């Protein structure tokens, strides 16, 4: 992954697979796996592969707008990530490492960071990447025009800076005039933050992809959406530059000879949109060299039997969960939630539903995160006796027929469970939950599936019909809990309001947490509290399948926990 | 005739308005909108951002006002801005219509050149072995959903023997987007449609020709001593074309709607995919635009059918 996940924190996905593109959900620019592939013929028919072309497949179409952050789709961002580098990127263990910015340091009061641009960073037309380009990009992202006329969704990337609200409201247009940005020289600048925040640099600023001021300052910003530079940018600073965009079918790119981290070894890259049902066949016949997304866990075993392709299934930085609306009286007692977690035989569910390609989780941080620790965490191993005991303690007495009475209503409990039709596995998970709960005497009624947008809207707006639901979070590179977990967060879907939790979250980005070891310790404390309180019934972190032609060589250092990164290092054998 | 056409065209206007109102209401009855569906936890003040965007798009206005805004803009050639794709709807419609028309026209041509000759052949020798065998094959093909053929054809002719492209409406390289490139990419999906749908024409042709061949004037033609071939060409076939021409008019109406499942399988970016994606994302401006275009297509197709009916059958008078 050459780049940083843009959504710093979490992207909502349909449990188990992002079959549905959601505006905004898809923000997760993982520049992750940039894949590569094969060859193309003029017509795109079954290609004869030439070793110099990498054909990368995505199964959801991109939108043909390639100025970074103009579009909110993950699939567009995947392509943009090959053309534009972010300020900081991530290594295989998801640590932030230099990219355009080669070094940075904080002031004593932690409210200013001084950043040094790599002097070798150049645009593909030979001009250097400068502080002015970074300022220009921040002014673009922070502007009122971006948020309204262009309907941009990444204004938050610059929101920690001083003066961001003046820009957003249109009262100012330049961070350097409102105290957010100071240019020191062409390759050095300072950013001034509104608050002391150990996460802001990583979860927001790091993933900004500068755009060339000398190109875009000539076009009024309100016209960018229809500009030819948006349909196909001519000047980029990433490993590849655009050659041709064929509608929403394919994008052809070639190696950027000026790329400052080394000219890519593979000369040509083609991004293609293909259907999920054709993808395995296209991989098998070599007309696709890298499947960047769209493979199903259920197909992994079959894919592994295809000669000439390599399949890997790294764990996802995210998790599937069973949500509970905590303001409903039946879920208020923590013992009830713990009983539910104990009642699920998640190992067996993973075998049956995810074909073994998932890892049970017990807290808010998936095992791939650097902030994860299993120390002090209750794994909630499957234990029906314990579940029954907890429910007894919580006053959920069994009735004559063995089903339990909900003490908040005095009637037999009947919990409803909602899920989305966009997922291939949610229906199975729903039935498994229903059976597991029945075994502890709790009746579950499964609602008919809804399309993903409907379910998401109802969950977000606390629709009365939503009691329990199945969904998934796909998280950003930085583990910052804000956005999902604070009492006031719109995406705190369970509506878990707990001052102690908020305090523990605040400790993960306070002044002490500028030291990574301190920050990790703060995360551990928070995760342990969540693990004990169980605002969600955690299920598992699914794996994500990637596949590529076996003659494509991806160095071990580029095999990140989220898939292959740094496409400029890849080569054909 | 001209008066009739003008009258029909004018009659379409209230119909289109009714269709657009209906679509508009249906869409807004569905829970959620594209902006509600923004679920990005990093956005610090999501409610505020959503409010701004809703105001920007006029979604906070009363429904009738929103509708009138939309109508006013459409009358000025402005279909609005796609919520999910962040670009003007018109720039999305252009390529989608082009792709869909190429596929539909190609499929229609294949349907006619397969279906009509089969029907003629069957009508020339009804109840013969040839008639029964081709009919059985036609019915089998007609009963199989076309996407089954699509998968089969894709596997055999694009993956096993890479003769045709397996995916997309255009290829890569310098010829991308040329007419030949378009046709090359549309051929496999067009064949999948034609294999199924030609049956409609072969059955219409056969039935209609058999009906006509029992008419008195055909008997008269034979009695005059005309050769059988001439009887069929001049007297039977021409008269039998009346219902086929009508069917053709209806087909034209359906052309612009695209073929959702097929387009999905071939990732062929046409009207079908554009519409279905827009529906799942509640992308109102796109849904309104595609619905309106599809409705116009169907209404015009019906009009064409009626006009062609009058042309091929002089007995039909519209005045």
Image (cartoon, coloured by chain):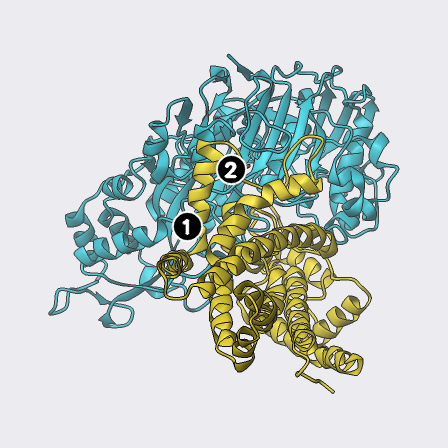
Chain colours: A cyan, B yellow
Vertical position of residue A18 compared to residue A233: above or below: below
User: Looking at this rendering, what residue extends furthest in the bottom direction?
Assistant: B319
User: Looking at this rendering, what residue extends furthest in the front direction?
Assistant: B225
Circle number at residue A156? none
Q: Position of residue A236 (x, y in %)?
A: 74, 27
Q: Position of residue A399 (x, y in %)?
A: 14, 68
| Residue depicted at 74% across the width and 15% down the height | A120
Packing grade of label 2 (10 A; few <14, some 14-19, many >=20) is many
Provide the secondary structure element on which disc 2 rests: loop
| Residue depicted at 77% across the width and 41% down the height | A140
Instruction: Quadrant for residue B275, please give it.
Output: bottom right
Foreground of the two, A193 or B148? B148
| Residue depicted at 78% across the width and 50% down the height | A144
Vertical position of residue A257 compared to residue B58: above or below: above
State whether residue A487 appears in this view: no
Foreground of the two, B128 or A464? B128
User: Looking at this rendering, what residue extends furthest in the top direction?
Assistant: A573
State whether residue A573 appears in this view: yes
Provide the secondary structure element on which disc 1 rests: helix
Foreground of the two, A524 or A96? A96
Q: Nearer the viewer, mark 2 or mark 1?
A: 1
The residue tagged 2 is A507
Packing grade of label 1 (10 A; few <14, some 14-19, many >=20) is few
The residue tagged 1 is B148
| Image quarter hosting the N terminus of chain A | top right
On screen, residue B195 versus residue A530, left or right, reads right
Q: Position of residue A31 (x, y in %)?
A: 57, 31
The numbered mark 2 sits on a residue in which chain?
A
The numbered mark 1 sits on a residue in which chain?
B
Q: CA distance from mark 2 to mark 1?
A: 57 Å
């Amino acid at each position: 992954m050459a780049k940083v996940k843009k959504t710093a924190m979490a992207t909502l996905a349909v449990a188990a697979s992002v079959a549905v593109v959601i505006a905004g959900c898809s923000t997760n620019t993982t520049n992750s796996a940039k894949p590569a592939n094969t060859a193309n013929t003029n017509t795109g028919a079954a290609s004869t592969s030439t070793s110099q072309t990498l054909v990368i497949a995505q199964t959801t179409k991109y939108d043909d707008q390639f100025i970074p952050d103009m579009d909110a789709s993950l699939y567009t961002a995947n392509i943009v990530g090959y053309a534009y580098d972010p300020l900081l990127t991530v290594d295989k263990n998801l640590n932030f490492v230099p990219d355009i910015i080669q070094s940075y340091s904080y002031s004593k009061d932690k409210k200013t960071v001084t950043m040094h641009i790599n002097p070798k960073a150049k645009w593909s037309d030979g001009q250097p990447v400068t502080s002015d380009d970074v300022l220009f990009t921040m002014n673009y992202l922070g502007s009122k025009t971006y948020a309204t006329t262009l309907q941009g969704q990444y204004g938050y990337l610059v929101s920690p800076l001083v003066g961001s609200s003046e820009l957003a409201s249109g009262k100012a247009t330049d961070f350097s005039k409102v105290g957010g940005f100071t240019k020191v020289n062409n390759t050095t600048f300072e950013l001034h933050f509104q608050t002391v925040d150990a996460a802001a640099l990583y979860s927001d600023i790091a993933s900004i992809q500068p755009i060339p001021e000398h190109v875009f300052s000539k076009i009024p910003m309100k016209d960018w959406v229809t500009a030819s530079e948006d349909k196909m940018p001519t000047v980029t600073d990433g490993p590849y530059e655009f050659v041709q965009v064929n509608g929403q079918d394919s994008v052809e790119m070639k190696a950027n000879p000026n790329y400052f981290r080394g000219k890519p070894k593979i000369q040509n890259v083609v991004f293609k949109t293909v259907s999920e049902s054709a993808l395995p066949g296209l991989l098998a016949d070599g007309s696709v060299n890298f499947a960047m997304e769209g493979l199903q866990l259920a197909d992994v075993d079959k894919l592994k039997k295809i000669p000439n392709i390599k399949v890997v299934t790294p764990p996802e930085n995210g998790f599937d969960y069973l949500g509970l609306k905590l303001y409903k009286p039946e879920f208020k007692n923590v013992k009830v939630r713990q009983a539910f977690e104990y009642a699920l035989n998640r190992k067996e569910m993973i075998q049956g539903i995810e074909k073994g390609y998932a890892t049970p989780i017990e807290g808010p941080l998936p095992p791939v995160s650097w902030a994860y620790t299993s120390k002090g965490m209750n794994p909630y191993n499957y234990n029906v006796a314990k579940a029954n005991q907890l429910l007894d303690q919580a006053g959920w007495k069994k009735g004559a027929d063995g089903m339990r009475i909900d003490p908040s209503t005095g009637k037999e409990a009947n919990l409803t469970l909602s899920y989305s039709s966009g997922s291939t596995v949610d229906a199975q998970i729903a039935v498994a939950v229903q059976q597991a709960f029945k075994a502890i005497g709790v009746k579950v009624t499964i609602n008919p599936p809804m399309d993903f947008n409907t379910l998401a809207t109802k969950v977000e707006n606390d629709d009365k019909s939503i009691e329990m639901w199945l969904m998934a979070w796909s998280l950003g590179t930085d583990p910052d809990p804000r956005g999902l977990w604070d009492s006031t967060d719109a995406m705190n879907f369970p509506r878990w309001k707990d001052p102690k939790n908020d305090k523990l979250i605040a400790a993960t980005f306070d002044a002490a947490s500028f030291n990574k070891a301190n920050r990790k310790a703060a995360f551990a404390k928070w995760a342990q509290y969540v693990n004990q309180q169980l605002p969600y019934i955690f299920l598992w972190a699914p794996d994500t399948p990637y596949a590529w032609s076996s003659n494509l060589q991806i160095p071990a250092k580029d095999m990140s926990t989220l898939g292959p990164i740094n496409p400029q290092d890849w080569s054909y054998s | 005739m001209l008066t009739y056409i003008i009258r029909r065209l004018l009659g379409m206007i209230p119909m289109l308005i009714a269709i657009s109102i209906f679509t508009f209401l249906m869409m807004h009855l569905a829970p959620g909108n594209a902006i509600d569906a923004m679920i990005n936890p990093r956005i610090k003040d999501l409610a505020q951002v959503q409010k701004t965007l809703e105001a920007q798009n006029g979604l906070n206005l009363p429904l009738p006002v929103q509708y009138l805004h939309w109508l006013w803009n459409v009358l000025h050639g402005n279909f609005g801005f796609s919520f999910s794709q962040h670009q003007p709807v018109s720039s999305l419609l252009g390529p989608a219509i082009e792709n869909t028309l190429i596929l539909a026209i190609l499929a229609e041509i294949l349907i006619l050149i397969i279906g009509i000759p089969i029907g003629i052949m069957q009508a020339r020798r009804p109840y013969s072995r040839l008639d029964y065998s081709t009919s059985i094959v036609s019915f089998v093909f007609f009963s199989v959903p076309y996407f089954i053929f699509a998968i089969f054809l894709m596997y055999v002719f694009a993956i096993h023997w890479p003769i045709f492209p397996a995916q997309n409406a255009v290829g890569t390289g310098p010829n991308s987007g040329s007419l030949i490139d378009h046709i090359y990419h549309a051929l496999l999906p067009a064949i999948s449609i034609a294999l199924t749908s030609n049956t409609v024409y072969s059955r219409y042709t056969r039935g209609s020709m058999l009906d006509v061949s029992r008419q008195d004037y055909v008997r008269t033609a034979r009695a005059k001593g005309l050769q059988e071939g001439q009887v069929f060409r001049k007297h039977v076939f021409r008269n039998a074309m009346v219902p086929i021409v009508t069917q053709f008019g209806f087909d034209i109406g359906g052309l612009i709607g695209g073929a959702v499942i097929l387009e999905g399988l071939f990732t062929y970016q046409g009207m079908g995919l554009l519409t279905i994606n827009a529906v799942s994302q509640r992308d109102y401006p796109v849904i309104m635009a595609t619905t309106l275009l599809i409705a116009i297509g169907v209404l015009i197709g019906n009009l064409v059918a009626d006009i062609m009916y009058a042309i091929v059958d002089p007995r039909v008078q519209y005045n």
